[in-house]
């Protein structure tokens, strides 16, 4: 009996000393809580094991839906683009302003993907304490989080062009994608294809623009060319119907046919160039007329056109050489255009236009 009492007393004293020591350590401020000072090795190992065992004990009941559904993957790309790229990167997004300062460093999901789909879903939904990973389940549905899981598992090996075709953008351009998941956005075969330099059919709209002639002139004088959309993954005649609409769009602009141009633009179309994004109505009231005026006097030489089918959507890219005279000054531009289109009962409609140009040597 005395031995048992002595054991309890000894244990109590030891625990009391440890508690006092822990309290002194906490109140002393000796531990550096800054994110730029890594955990001690024992602390890091303990936290990693605690995290993995905690997740494993709670994720087993998750019911995994069909994660190979192209529509689910495409919707997940929209959410991921808005919510995750700043920390976890994406195809074509190799760093961000916030990522270097995070501790622990978030995994690069564009390379790692999803090793366990239940685990990925659980982390997205519930987050991780004492890290920068939020609990997205507070603001998003299970369906949306399974969409992101579906996209994450497909991301390794995906090209930047394939990512953009699904709706992915750099983090600073993603304000509209935070709650994607309830709208229609279908995807399909994402196999990479080489862009052919061989063009077919009529002249493409090699316009840099959605921009006025004054804007073109400013680009020619500038030293730094605009960042052009990537042509990676596109191939000539991969989606002939979408390419035909792209060519008709070019022709309508060159012929000054406003009605035909607007008929090919979906109501929700976004028109982007040089960091500026315009709606269909804003473009119709302003830059459309300026584009038509500029193209009337321009000489356009098509260089290439290619496309990528994505189920009910497609991407069509083209490059052209533009030569014109503005205010008595010759202009020579390499123009890149990227169109995203959706298939409707009435045919293909353009949902996104991206233009960029850079000056050419004479």
Image (cartoon, rainbow, N blue to C red):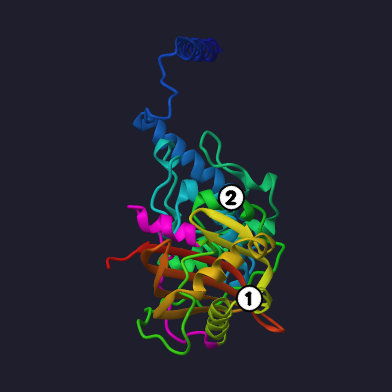
Q: Which mark is residue 261?
A: 1
Q: Residue at x 37, y 65 (%)?
A: 331
Q: Tell me which label, 2 or 1, sits earlier in the chain.
A: 2
Q: Residues within 10 Å of mark 1 (few under 14, many from 20)?
A: some
Instruction: In the rendered structure, find residue 225 and report the number of the disc placed on it.
Output: none
Q: SS of the residue at dot 2?
A: helix
Q: Residue at x 36, y 53 (%)?
A: 222
Residue at the farthest left position: 361
Q: Residue furthest front?
A: 328
Whether residue 119 appears in this view of the structure is no
Q: Is residue 82 visible?
A: yes
Which x, y percent locates residue 230? 41, 67
Please state which of residues 153 and 81 is positioned toward the viewer in this rendering: 81
Image quadrant in which you'd find residue 41: top left
Identify the mark at residue 124; answer none if there is no mark. Answer: 2
Q: Which stretch appears magenta?
A: 213-240
Residue at x 43%, y 63% (from the top left corner)? 326
């Amino acid at each position: 009996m005395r031995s048992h009492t002595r054991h309890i007393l000894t244990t109590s004293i030891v625990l009391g000393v440890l508690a006092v020591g822990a309290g002194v350590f906490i109140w002393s401020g000796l531990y550096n809580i800054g994110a730029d000072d890594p955990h001690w090795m024992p602390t890091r190992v303990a936290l990693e094991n605690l995290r993995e065992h905690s997740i494993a004990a709670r994720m087993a009941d998750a019911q995994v839906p069909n994660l190979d559904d192209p529509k689910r993957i495409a919707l997940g790309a929209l959410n991921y683009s808005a919510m995750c790229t700043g920390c976890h990167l994406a195809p074509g997004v190799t760093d961000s302003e916030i990522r270097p300062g995070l501790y622990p460093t978030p995994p690069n999901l564009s390379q790692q993907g999803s090793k366990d789909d239940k685990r990925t879903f659980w982390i997205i939904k519930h987050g991780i304490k004492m890290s920068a990973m939020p609990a997205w389940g507070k603001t998003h549905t299970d369906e949306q989080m399974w969409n992101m899981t579906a996209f994450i598992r497909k991301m390794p090996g995906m090209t930047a062009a394939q990512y953009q075709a699904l709706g992915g953008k750099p983090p600073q351009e993603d304000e509209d994608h935070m709650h994607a998941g309830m709208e229609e956005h279908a995807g399909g075969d994402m196999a990479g294809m080489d862009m052919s330099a061989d063009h077919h059919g009529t002249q493409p709209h090699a316009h840099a623009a959605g921009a006025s002639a004054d804007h073109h002139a400013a680009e020619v004088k500038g030293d730094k060319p605009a960042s052009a959309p990537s042509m990676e993954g596109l191939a000539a005649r991969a989606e002939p119907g979408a390419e035909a609409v792209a060519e008709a769009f070019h022709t309508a602009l060159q012929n000054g046919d406003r009605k035909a141009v607007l008929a090919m633009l979906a109501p929700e179309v976004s028109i982007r160039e040089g960091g500026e994004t315009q709606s269909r109505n804003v473009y119709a009231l302003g830059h459309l007329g300026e584009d038509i005026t500029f193209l009337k006097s321009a000489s356009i030489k098509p260089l290439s056109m290619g496309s990528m089918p994505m189920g009910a959507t497609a991407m069509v890219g083209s490059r052209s050489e533009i030569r014109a005279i503005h205010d008595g000054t010759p202009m020579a531009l390499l123009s890149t255009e990227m169109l995203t289109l959706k298939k409707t009962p009435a045919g293909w409609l353009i949902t996104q236009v991206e233009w960029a140009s850079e000056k050419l040597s004479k």
